[in-house]
Image: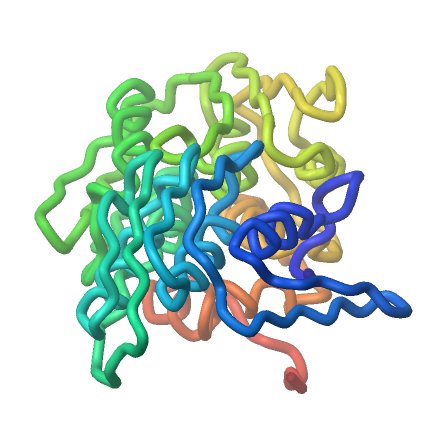
Amino acid sequence: PGGCVIGAGGRPIDLFLEGFKALGAEINEDNNYYHIKANKLKGCEYFFTLISVTATESMMMAAVFASGATTLKNCAMEPEIKALADYLNSQGAKIKGAGTPTILINGVNKINAGSYRVIPDRIETGSFAIMAAATKSEFLINKCHPEHIRILLKIFNKIGIPFKEGKDYLKIIPAKKIKPYSIKTHEYPGFPTDLQSPYTVLMTQAEGSSIIHETIYDRRLLFVDLLSQMGADIIMCDPHRVVVNGPSKLYSRKLTSPDLRAGIAMIIAALAARGQTEIDNIYQIDRGYEDIDGRLRLLGADIKRIGTLNL
């Protein structure tokens, strides 16, 4: 469906198609296009064979207009799913259990228009928190929900990163020493795969060895070759695991951002490195971090965009 190329098998949509069929939709494939239609969707009980955020969201939205009741099991539990359900309920939907493995939806005929404030981006919050930790800087992150990155903050306690938090702010305080700590990515509330790349950079500055185990996407660790070019001591055990030996002095290089999260990891590494680093293909970074260079300049970073981006 698009996005980053981070899985050997692509990013399949089979869970979406199976779910829509379970609701009574008719699906036809024609020359690599899918035609999906239904006179009326019907409520059902559906079990996700794999935990998927977007599949959970898509089924939940479709079931809002299905007749009768729908039960979704083995659902993803990310905060964004609960936020989506909160929004739909505020417009007239009848959804219970969002944010748990089982979601119950009673279909309605219509929902109303209205306004809703989108929740803060927890991955952006985590990325900036890791950036502050890796560069031993003091960041105050406002308008965020620290509770949504609780697993990262628990790890910060273990590796010696001081911080202060409130309901809607997070302050990262420079650490005198960063301890190594191994992580294994997992669905929420586990360690998010989208923070694995930035965290790998952080571990290059830790005093000791750590293992990064990526369980979600088998190509997501390939970016570590770029860190090795910058001077990091990283051993790739297999497509899912690397050993990071730190601390390493990082040096400037000319790099190409392979994907969104590796791109922000490259920026973090560049800020921690000696010399001037140039990063190409920043379109990838712009997809997930609005005005990243402008905001970092406000924090005192020596960073500038070369040329313009045509979206």
- Where residue 298 sits in the image (x, y, percent)? 33, 70
The residue lying furthest to the right in this view is: 31
Q: Is residue 137 visible?
A: no
Residue nearest the viewer, comparing 41 with 288: 41
User: Which residue corresponds to the image point at 66% horizontal and 20% vertical from the top-left?
Assistant: 241
Q: Is residue 144 left or right of residue 269?
A: left
Q: Quadrant of the N terminus?
A: bottom right
Q: Is residue 254 above or below residue 151?
A: below
User: Which residue corresponds to the image point at 70% horizontal and 40% vertical from the top-left?
Assistant: 223
Q: Is residue 95 above or below residue 37?
A: above
Q: Is residue 168 left or right of residue 246?
A: left
User: Which residue corresponds to the image point at 63% horizontal and 48% vertical from the top-left?
Assistant: 18
Q: Is residue 251 left or right of residue 295?
A: right
Q: How is the image coloured?
A: rainbow
Q: Is residue 310 visible?
A: yes
Image quarter of residue 178: top left
Residue nearest the viewer, comparing 286 with 27: 27
Residue nearest the viewer, comparing 12 with 289: 12
- Where residue 274 sits in the image (x, y, percent)? 58, 46
- Where residue 184 sits in the image (x, y, percent)? 50, 22
Image quarter of residue 24: bottom right
- Where residue 75 sits in the image (x, y, percent)? 41, 39
The residue lying furthest to the left in this view is: 166
Residue nearest the viewer, comparing 38 with 177: 38
